[in-house]
Image: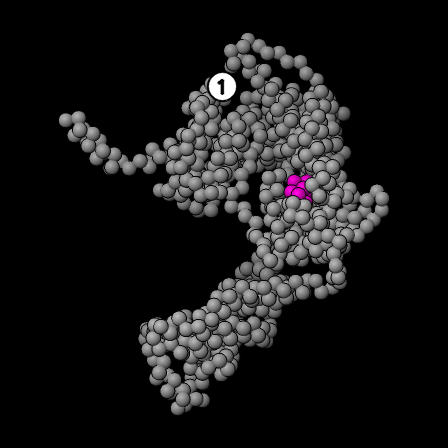
Amino acid sequence: MLRKLLVVAAIGLAIGLFFAFDLGRYLSLDGFKSQQAAIEAWRAANPLAAGLAFFAAYVAVTALSLPGAAVMTLAVGAVFGLGWGTLIASFASSVGALLAFLLARFLLRDWVQARFGERLKAVNDGVARDGAFYLFTLRLVPVFPFFLINLALALTPIRTWTFYWVSQVGMLAGTLVYVNAGTQLAKIDSLAGILSPGLIASFTLLGVFPLVARRIVEAIKARRVYARWPKPARFDRNLVVIGAGSAGLVTAYIAAAVKAKVTLVEKHRMGGDCLNTGCVPSKALIRSAKFLSHARRAREFGMRQAPVEFDFAEVMARVQSVVRTVEPHDSVARYTELGVEVLEGTAKVVSPWAVEVATAAGTQTLTSRAIVIAAGARPFVPPIPGLEEVGYLTSDTVWNLRELPRRLVVLGGGPIGSELTQAFARLGARVTQVEMLPRLLMREDPEVSEMVARRFREEGIEVLLNHKAKQFLVDNGEKVLVAEHDGRDVRIPFDAALVAVGRVANLKGYGLEELGIPAGRTVETNAYLQTIYPNIYAAGDVAGPFQFTHTAAHQAWYAAVNALFDPLKKFKADYSVIPWATFTEPEVARVGLNELEAKEKGIAHEVTVYGLDDLDRAIADSEAHGFVKVLTAPGKDRILGVTLVGEHAGDLIAEYVLAMKQGIGLNRILGTIHIYPTLAEANKYAAGAWKRAHAPQRLLEWVGRFHAWRRG
């Protein structure tokens, strides 16, 4: 401990003296230029001493992580020229970095590893496995300051010798560029010299270097990952897409539209979950259930009664009819007509450029320049004891029902669970919704959750919050769910159970494991949707981070364009404005931040709320409930996020999605004509509420005096 204290004291003294005597003035470009002639004269008279002095000063600056290393590199080039300057700067920077590394390791590594070792396990394992490559990448592409790299790597298990030689090699290219720029600086005698071709070329190289270095790193990484796979001399196709859900369909469509040869492989049903078991059937069921709810509210619309006779099986038949009507939009025939080759079979990636497809006619192997995995997701079924024995439904299988369950228990208070809970309750089932968290729709603001839960209870739904499902069993011939609440067991008898606690990505059977493509909850991708193999992409539910049909289609554009046009051009997927809706009643829609997230993230914001109970059209429709909540930057009309609760919230949110995407503020929404009487006027009135809260009161006082003066 004493040795460490002495080292800290020595470092502190050195840094203190550096700032106390303002030595930094000698490490500025202006300071060097003012002394350049004297320095060059000294170097000419004492070349060895000058070289050693520069070397020692450079090492000291780097070792102590002082500002000025970049200027010193330029100065070395100006004084010693390209050859000797590169030699001095290269070794001095590497030795200085090594000293900084050793100091940080001596002072901090044991303490950091003892305190945070468990959290740093993944980092330590990664550095132990690929530390040299990580360091080389950081040195070659100067994204992070080098002094931070010195300190951070010192806390890891990387070997000292590895750190030194990788730093020496990795920094060489950047050092050469800076020293070359310095040689050109030496030739400036006046402001006119700034425009010299040599200096312009040097600084152009300095700016382009990180981009070139990044390309080099990408090429090295690609070479490493592709090393064990033979690359075909030519390819059968430009693109193979695995999965014909939203992401796969849009990817294939875009590829065909730009005249690429594309094959789409689907092992189950075209259209994926959205068409067959998700968005389309659920909204068809919700619409039928909503009609029944309106009939029961007949008196609200001035009618004594509106009796409705229906058969549950016929309602479910209508749901399937809707699916069949939409089906041609996603059919094999349509996509074949668009120019997509569609294969019905099971696909497996067997190399970075080959996909094996097993169809009814046999197995074939397709070679392709690029591959997009869009395998989708499936309902998550938790391992609750007894669940398999009593049987259960999911959002995939519930559409097979033709007899309405008398008592239905729904596990899950998220969007899927809540939508189906209300729909089945309106169709006549006694529904108990069980949620282990303290409220429904936990991603929304608390008052949103409360509005939905209150409506559910008003419609006869038993909403059990803070109830954790423990066990399913059969007691005297009756199915029972045992849930824990406040430390005691609650028994919930039921006839059918619907499990709706989320969805998990389909990651097995596509060759990910064999190729070594990392996958946790989803396939790991970079900002361009690339896996560790730059020509293999993932999009949609299998890639995350959102599990929405419209997000999958959004990602598909990036996956298709990047897969077809990289390395000429590629785009980072943009998640800055992602809307979503939950189609309960009241409907809930959101884009951007809500109040809960803004507070959790410490983002400064203002909140404006407009209640729909004040809106003429909502009153006329007997739907005067809900609100528009807008979050804006303090004192500005820039929209950070919007939550909409009420009739057609999912439609009304579109105006705010456009506004956020295009940078339109509330002032311009307020200045836009909205048809009267419509629900869309709520957006304008919310903007008006913000405007009133930000009215210039002092100016209005003077305007009032002006009008009083004009009245005489």
Q: Quadrant of residue 505?
A: top right
Percent across and percent down for residue 186 are 40, 78
Position of 77 relative to 113 (above/below)? below
Q: Which residues are magenta?
A: 245-253
Q: Nearer the viewer, residue 175 or 646?
A: 175
Quadrant of image for the C terminus: top left
Percent across and percent down for residue 574 are 54, 48
Circle 1 crowding by C-alpha within 10 Å: few under 14, some 14–19, many from 20: few
Q: Residue at x 35, y 72 (%)?
A: 192
Q: Residue at x 55, y 37 (%)?
A: 580
Q: Nearer the viewer, residue 641 or 474?
A: 641
Percent across and percent down for residue 223 are 67, 65
Q: Which residue is mark 1?
A: 622
Position of 33 relative to 706 (above/below)? below
Q: Quadrant of residue 609?
A: top left
In this rendering, would 353 be left or right of 148?
A: right
In this rendering, would 409 be left or right of 681?
A: right
Render colour scheme? one colour
What secondary structure is the magenta-colored segment mainly? helix
The answer to whether residue 112 shows anywhere in this view is yes
Single out the residue that lies furthest toward the bottom. Answer: 45
Q: Residue at x 40, y 37 (%)?
A: 668
Q: Can residue 249 be found in the magenta stretch?
A: yes
Q: Secondary structure at mark 1?
A: loop
The answer to whether residue 540 shows anywhere in this view is no
